[in-house]
């Protein structure tokens, strides 16, 4: 079947939207976020960085790689073999899985400042667990945060405006309907790399008990910023949480905070930890983590065996392959390649983001038009691609060469057209925009 035509996926997506609110459990996997029509939508199988859709059309994923989950590539044989062994032996019982202890030991070995670990199965819930523990440990309820930390009430409470209307969204497009208004004022925002702003916020809110932040999403921390946050948290008596659900294991074997030498009180991990299998973790100092026992944080399926087994296997492969350093370097090369291709055809490409989670924009061009056109045309060449590329060690040199050969053609086409000409080639309009991140 010709690339870009996926009647089975399109038909199933239309059915799915009638049965599942939004069509998918993940905003980032809604078809309309990628193309207004014609996105493959569903997969039948995977291998390396290849995905086959429901029509058995193969695509090379130089896009989101499971929305950031698979730095070892899809269906990694060592990870899958470990999981199959667990399935054969049994995944869940009345007794506990020994892999929980083994994984805790490994995570603490990688992060010597930490003493204890708790697990969950998704990023949003491990952040909620971390906030609960941090609030319990500090004795204060207010949270000062920057960055993206999931969908739970504690976080979306920041979107509750000060005047009983919902107009003043800090995250446009994420309405906090269903979030109790009594939580208004419980989550306060500060801007990444604005140490003075955080200092003023803490001075104005002495009852802030938690500082919750991503170490980096787009721009790296400025010199002294993380150290300053650490000092403010200590002086204020607040628990400092580094959310590394997205950034972890994408440069070093562990959190990227290790590269900066700044130690939090808690840190969360997800995404890459199980290379596609559901496992997340919060690690922390014993005196903070023990506060979990003064609250109620408990779930049956947090004790299933597949997640920690996959994580142990994935960490072993990451160490053997030096995968975090590899994807960091691959991302740097991809960002440089985008810029060079743009210069060759007259497009001003601006890469950004963590190298392993690279994105780009085209200066002075309509961002949604550009994304839609690139995604449409790259499907024709057999690629899932857009204005982002999440790196995996499965992105081999020969595949990267094919990706850039195709992208060169698409960039050259873009350079020859103005916005009106691009719009004329997009009869179904442009993709939906996502929500705006705080940093």
Image (spheres, rainbow, N blue to C red):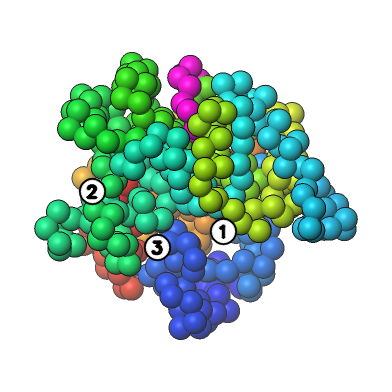
At mark 3, the secondary structure is helix
Which residue is at 28% across, 47% downward? 186
Q: Badge 2: few (under 14), some or many (20 or more) residues near its Cα, within 10 Å?
A: some
Residue furthest to the right in view is 89
For the residues labelled 2 and 1, say whether their Cβ atoms are less than 8 Å apart: no
Q: Nearer the viewer, mark 2 or mark 1?
A: 2
Q: Nearer the viewer, mark 3 or mark 1?
A: 3
For the residues labelled 2 and 3, say whether their Cβ atoms are less than 8 Å apart: no
Foreground residue, 2 or 94?
Answer: 94
Q: Which mark is residue 185?
A: 2
Q: Which mark is residue 33?
A: 3
Q: What is the x, y in percent for residue 353? A: 40, 36
Which residue is at 45% across, 45% downward? 132
Q: CA distance from mark 2 to mark 3?
A: 31 Å
Q: Which mark is residue 382?
A: 1
Q: Is residue 260 magenta?
A: yes
Q: What is the x, y in percent for residue 144? A: 30, 38
Is residue 345 toward the left or the right of residue 300 in the image? Answer: left
Is residue 206 toward the left or the right of residue 110 in the image? Answer: left
**Span of residues in magenta:** 259-267
State the quadrant of the N terminus. bottom right
The answer to whether residue 328 is visible is: no
Q: What is the x, y in percent for residue 411? A: 38, 48
Foreground residue, 377 or 221?
Answer: 221
């Amino acid at each position: 079947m010709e690339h870009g035509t996926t009647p089975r996926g399109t038909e199933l997506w239309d059915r799915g939207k009638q049965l599942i609110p939004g069509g998918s459990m993940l905003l980032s996997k809604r078809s309309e976020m990628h193309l207004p029509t014609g996105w493959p939508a569903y997969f039948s199988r995977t291998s390396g960085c290849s995905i086959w859709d429901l029509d058995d059309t193969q695509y090379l994923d130089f896009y989101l790689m499971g929305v950031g989950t698979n730095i070892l590539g899809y269906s990694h044989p060592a990870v899958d073999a470990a999981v199959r062994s667990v399935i054969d032996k049994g995944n869940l019982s009345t007794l506990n899985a020994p892999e929980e202890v083994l994984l805790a030991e490994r995570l603490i070995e990688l992060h010597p400042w930490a003493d204890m670990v708790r697990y969950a199965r998704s990023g949003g819930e491990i952040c909620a667990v971390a906030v609960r523990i941090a609030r319990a440990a500090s004795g204060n309820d207010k949270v000062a945060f920057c960055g993206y930390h999931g969908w739970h009430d504690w976080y979306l409470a920041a979107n509750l405006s000060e005047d009983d209307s919902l107009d003043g969204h800090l995250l446009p497009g994420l309405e906090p309907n269903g979030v109790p208004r009594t939580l208004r004022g419980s989550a306060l925002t500060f801007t990444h790399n604005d140490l003075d702003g955080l200092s003023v916020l803490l001075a104005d809110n002495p009852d802030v008990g938690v500082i919750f932040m991503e170490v980096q999403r787009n721009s790296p921390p400025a010199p002294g910023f993380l150290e300053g946050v650490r000092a403010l948290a200590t002086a204020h008596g607040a628990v400092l949480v580094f959310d590394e659900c997205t950034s972890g294991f994408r440069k070093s074997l562990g959190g990227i905070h290790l590269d900066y030498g700044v130690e939090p009180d808690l840190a969360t991990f997800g995404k890459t930890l199980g290379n596609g299998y559901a496992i997340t973790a919060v690690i922390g100092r014993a005196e903070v983590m023990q506060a979990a026992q003064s609250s109620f944080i408990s779930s049956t399926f947090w004790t299933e065996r597949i997640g920690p087994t996959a994580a142990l296997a994935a960490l072993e492969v990451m160490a053997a392959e030096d995968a975090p350093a590899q994807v960091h370097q691959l991302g740097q090369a991809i960002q440089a390649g985008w810029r060079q291709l743009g210069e060759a055809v007259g497009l001003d490409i601006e890469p950004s983001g963590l190298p392993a989670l690279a994105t780009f924009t085209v200066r002075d061009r309509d961002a949604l038009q550009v994304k839609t056109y690139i995604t449409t045309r790259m499907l024709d060449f057999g690629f899932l691609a857009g204005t982002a590329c999440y790196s995996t060690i499965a992105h081999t040199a020969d595949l990267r060469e094919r990706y850039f050969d195709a992208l060169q053609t698409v960039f050259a086409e873009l350079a020859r057209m103005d916005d009106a000409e691009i719009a004329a080639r997009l009869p179904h309009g442009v993709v939906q925009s996502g929500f705006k991140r705080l940093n």
